[in-house]
Image (cartoon, rainbow, N blue to C red):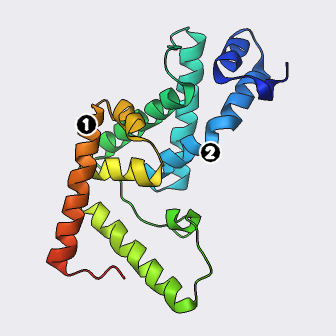
Amino acid sequence: MEVKTLNDQQLIANYLKGNEKSFEELLSRHKDRIYTSIYLFVKDHSLAEDIFQEVFIKIIDTLRKGKYNHEGKFLQWALRISYNMCVDYFRRTRRRPKVSATETFDIFDVLQNTDLNAEQNMIKSQTHQKIRSLVDMLPPEQREVVILRHYADMSFKEIAQLTRVSINTALGRMRYALINIRKMVEEKEVVLQ
């Protein structure tokens, strides 16, 4: 059977039997989503690459020691590891993640962009920048849920598992984040259009 047609569990089993190609397929299948989730937290390409490598070293180590729990999905497990490593990094350096664009990457560039004229593009860009700055002002738990939901495209179930809270808590944090953003828009009289 060709490696590309195997599911994640079969790839892991084959890798543990010595088939390196199986791990390569597992890595290529999930690397973009894992790297993007790390990058969205750290906002630095070289740091994201370092953490990404640490994540896969930990994954390999855990698999080889036979400590991987087959009950969960591989991607959710890998995202949890990457999330924990990002949190550890921020604890060590006392930094907090920011939702901001860089010269080479802006999450809003990925969003669908119908043919807009120059003025509409400028307004859209300014709106996105205002929203990012409002998200940055949220309390850490609320900001985290907004980043994971809208920037990493995770479901509330995945967010709850990743942050080790109930789905209701994750939903509540999102609800309060939206309420707080609305309050900030009103208080600061931010015009979003």
Amino acid under label 2? Asp
Along the polypeptide, which appears first: circle 1 or circle 2? 2
Which is nearer the eye, 114 or 95?
Answer: 114
Q: The N terminus is located in which quarter?
A: top right
Question: In this view of the protein, can residue 178 be seen by the observer?
Answer: yes
Name the spot of residue 179 as percent of width and height, x first.
Answer: 20, 60
Which is nearer the eye, 157 or 11?
Answer: 157
Tell me which residue sits at (74%, 22%) in the image.
Answer: 6
- In the figure, is residue 109 to the left or right of 136? right
Residue bearing mark 1: 168
Tell me which residue sits at (55%, 8%) in the image.
Answer: 66
Which is nearer the eye, 161 or 43?
Answer: 161
Name the spot of residue 119 as percent of width and height, x first.
Answer: 51, 91
**Above/below status of 64 relative to 76:** above
Amino acid under label 1? Asn
Looking at the image, which residue sits at the far right? 1
- Does dot 1 land on a helix, a strand or a loop? helix
Question: In this view of the protein, can residue 96 be seen by the observer?
Answer: no
Residue 129, quarter of the rendered image: bottom left
Name the spot of residue 82 as percent of width and height, x first.
Answer: 47, 36
- Does dot 2 land on a helix, a strand or a loop? helix
Q: Nearer the viewer, mark 1 or mark 2?
A: 1
**Above/below status of 36 relative to 169:** below
Tell me which residue sits at (69%, 16%) in the image.
Answer: 10
Residue 30, quarter of the rendered image: top right
**Above/below status of 119 relative to 13:** below
User: For residue 27, which numbered disc appears in the image?
Assistant: none
Residue bearing mark 2: 32
The crowd level at tag 2 (other Cα within 10 Å; few <14, some 14-19, many 20+) is few
The crowd level at tag 1 (other Cα within 10 Å; few <14, some 14-19, many 20+) is few
